[in-house]
Amino acid sequence: MTFSKPQKISFAILILTLISLYIILPTKLGNFSMPRINFKIGNLDFSKEIELKQGLDIKGGLQVVLNADMKDIAGGDRTSALESLKEVIGRRVDLFGVSESGVKTAISGNDYRLILELPGVTDPEQALTLIGQTAKMVFALPIYTPGATATDSATLTGFEPTDLTGADLARAQVTFESEDRSPAVSITFKDSGKNKFSQLTKENIGKPVAILLDGYPITMPTVQAEIDSGNAVITGKFSTEEAKSLAIQLNAGALPVPVSILSQKNIPATLGADSIKKSVTAGAIGLFMVIFFMVAYYGRMGFIASIGLVLYGIFTLTLYKLIPVVLSLPGIAGFLLSVGMAVDSNILVFERYKEEIRAGRDWRVALELAFGRAWDSIKDANTATIITGLILFNPLDWSFLNTSGSVRGFALTLILGIFISLFTGIVVTRNLLRLFFKDKPRTNNK
């Protein structure tokens, strides 16, 4: 038995749907316990429970206030040191797996503090141990597999620390190349680090040297010549924002600021259960109204499109769990907005189908032409929305754009919704129509 292309694609969609349902279903359904993912592939661990993360406004979380000890930091460097500390703590929180967290600075007189809000944290002791450590920076030599060269980046296996550390670094700041005014980062070493840096560069001319912060490589420049002055410049194709970010991270190790925990408290959900219930109810009503409109206006085609809309919801929730996406009220709003947009492509296709039928074409030909000719409009409309979503999400952390976690949550759910709606609208619905839709033969073009 041979299968047609639509049948093969539909079978793949069915498998994808079953996998998605397995991921999104709760661990327990009554007295029945669902089996969970529990296997490893190399260093990848797939044994963790896949949960839907919720934001502070829905689930609550942990608020931690840290005090930065600035007694060993010069007065003019304290604000920069606090920003460097914010950068390090923010990355540590991200590595801990807390999404949509908030890290803010607060300066009052001689008090320099960081305020952290960690949604959905269930292990406060581990989180406090992680974020409460002083930043540790070390210069290290990359380790490659035997016989490999530094240019073969795929063979990098680790790093060998040297005796040159962040304690030997005096300052890092953004500079500009004299020739083309391109951004760069200049670094200056203390007396304790000059000889170490000179020896390191002498022995590694033409080789890369990595700078690790908390074990994470933040840059890996190649040594061009021996440097015995204690002053060096890190060049590369940096943007101004990238150079500023690198300087901040280097200063986090150059100006290690001890921190202490002033207070910690659990933050209750700012939205009550009643508000969440109403939001879910509103979403369900909206989904029902969209399905009702599609079926009432487009008949069988609308019913098939509604099946695609249900699959859209299943695939979306699956991605929310896998990424994971932290669901806050703005994120839910982005999802609900994308539900309405999910049927836009189908409406454009169906209206185009009507035009092709009125032009006297056979319904099979009209269906294929409708999808093909509606694609340009679908692509342009969704591209414009994706660009808007990227501006709101601000993936490069540009300071002149939004940096709010809640707005980013809205943008992320909106962007994901658009991509998934394109898949369900163009691929899923199209194959379902090819398999199950059959229009009446047309004898004239009226």
Image (spheres, helix red, strand yellow):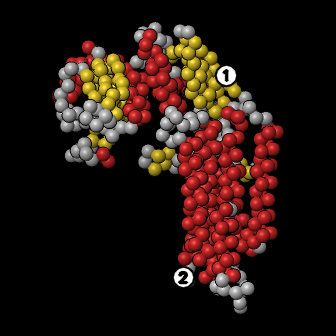
The image shows residue 204 at horizontal and vertical percentages of 20, 32
Q: Is residue 229 left or right of residue 390?
A: left
- Of residues 318 and 31, the one nearer the viewer is 318
Mark closest to the chain's N terminus, 2 or 1: 2
Give coordinates of residue 176: x percent, y percent. 32, 30
Q: Residue at x 36, y 30 (%)?
A: 212
- Residue 432 is at least partly visible in this image: no
Point out the image quarter for the C terminus: bottom right
**Count of labels shown?**
2
The residue at which mark 2 appears reads as 2
Residue corresponding to mark 1: 265
Query: How far apart are labels 2 and 1 at the CA level?
Result: 63 Å
The local secondary structure at tag 2 comes to loop
What is the x, y in percent for residue 127? 56, 27
Q: Amino acid at mark 2?
A: Thr
For label 1, the SS is: strand
Horizontal side of 337 relative to 402 (left or right) equals right
Q: Residue at x 57, y 36 (%)?
A: 402
**Amino acid under label 1?**
Lys
Q: Quadrant of the N terminus?
A: bottom right
